[in-house]
Amino acid sequence: MPNDNDGKPNLIIDTLADAVGALRLDDDMHELAKAHGELEPKAIEKLSANEARQQPTIADAVKHLLQKQGRSTDPEALVPGVTRKSMSIPARGGPLHALVYTPQGARDVPAILYIHGGGWVIANAEVYDGGARGLAKQTGAVVVSVDYRQAPEHKFPAAWDDCVDAWRWLGENAAALGADPARLAIAGESAGGCMAVATAVEARQLGLVAPRHVLAVYPVAQTGSLNTVSYLENAIAKPLNRPMIEWFLGHLLRTDADKQDTRLDLEHAGLAGLPPVTIINATIDPLRSDGEHLKDALEAAGVSVERKIYTGVSHEFFGTAAVVAKAQEAQEYAGARLRASLGVARA
């Protein structure tokens, strides 16, 4: 059932968010934000999960902006030299759909498990094509982007179980993809960034193959407090704000006790022994402070970690390299970090 005002954003807050965004965002990021606004997204926090899944995404906004600019929207034209196919991965909760990105001529290259974002409720691997495809290009690795089960139909920790199962499968089947099973990494965005770190921790606990690197792009690192510096600073930011995160958690969690589970509360997880970690953050993002706290926790656990903050961009910027310069920079930076750990020379 539609909620108040049929899901339309509060006019005053929406106008204020746009005005603040115009002041803080880089020009190209602002153009993308305006393109997203032209698609008339409703307020996620006022919708049902099914309604929210129908809303225009930042990927839709990229396509819209490219069309306005008279440019191709073909992903293979935007990122040449990378092909994509669909496949199914077996898991305890049922088969998982996955998209496999293969660089041209790939043979005995590394492989990366890529975990998409969307607050554990919305979006899918297709929506996050830009990030996964970009990493395949930047690293020369085969990238497997998995669609995990989502809340509220499948509450915590179903998605985490699926990611662990996908990681186990990749370790056992990388060679069939033309990849080297001894050179694997995990990457994820937002909710997927949280699960990337959690999967690396659980892989160690279960004795599965160890990743050589973990890339966490604006990860959720805790859900106990939505009053961090960046949550307060970006409470009405776009495309992610504090009410949306409250809505995501309301769909995800079984009880409030789940907030203390170390698969969500990464700051208190057993992080010692993890491989090198790269954290990418955006200034205009409620999750920026989570990245800072995770970096501190990793350093305290003796893990090699590097964090880079990109100014003038917002949450979801990483996969927008077709139209946002700092997204391209971030993908190149992530690619360099992953290549160093995976033993890949720059082509």
Image: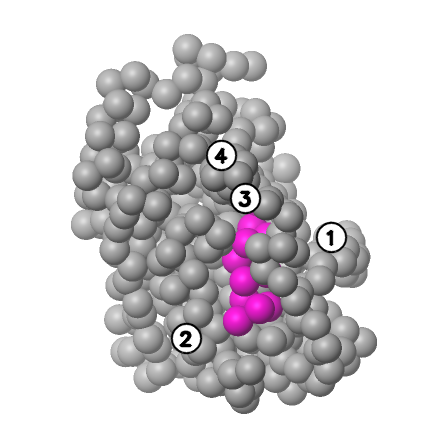
Earlier sequence position, callout 1 versus callout 2? 1
User: Quick one: label 2, few (<14), some, or many (20+) residues within 10 Å?
Assistant: many
Q: What's the residue at 29%, 44% (across, down)?
A: 27
Kind of residue indicated by mark 3 = Arg
Q: Nearer the viewer, mark 3 or mark 1?
A: 3
Please report the residue visible at 25 percent of the width from the left and 55 percent of the height from the top: 311
> In the rendered view, does 231 fall on the left or right side of 141?
left
Q: Are marks 2 and 4 in contact (CB under 8 Å)?
A: no
Who is closer to the viewer here, 154 or 127?
A: 127
User: Type of residue at label 1?
Assistant: His
User: Are the residues at dot 3 and dot 1 in contact (C-beta closer than 8 Å)?
Assistant: no
Camera-side mark, 4 or 1: 4
The correct choice, above or below, for 13 with respect to 287 in the image is above
Residue 157 placement (x, y as % from top left): 56, 52
| In magenta segment, residue 128 | yes
Q: Which residue is mark 4?
A: 68
Which mark is drawn over residue 277?
2
SS state under label 3: loop
Alpha carbon distance from label 2 to label 4:
38 Å
Q: Which residue is at the far front?
A: 70
Report which residue position mark 1 lands on.
97
Which residue has dot 3 on it? 71
Disc 2 marks which amino acid?
Val
Stretch in magenta = 127-138
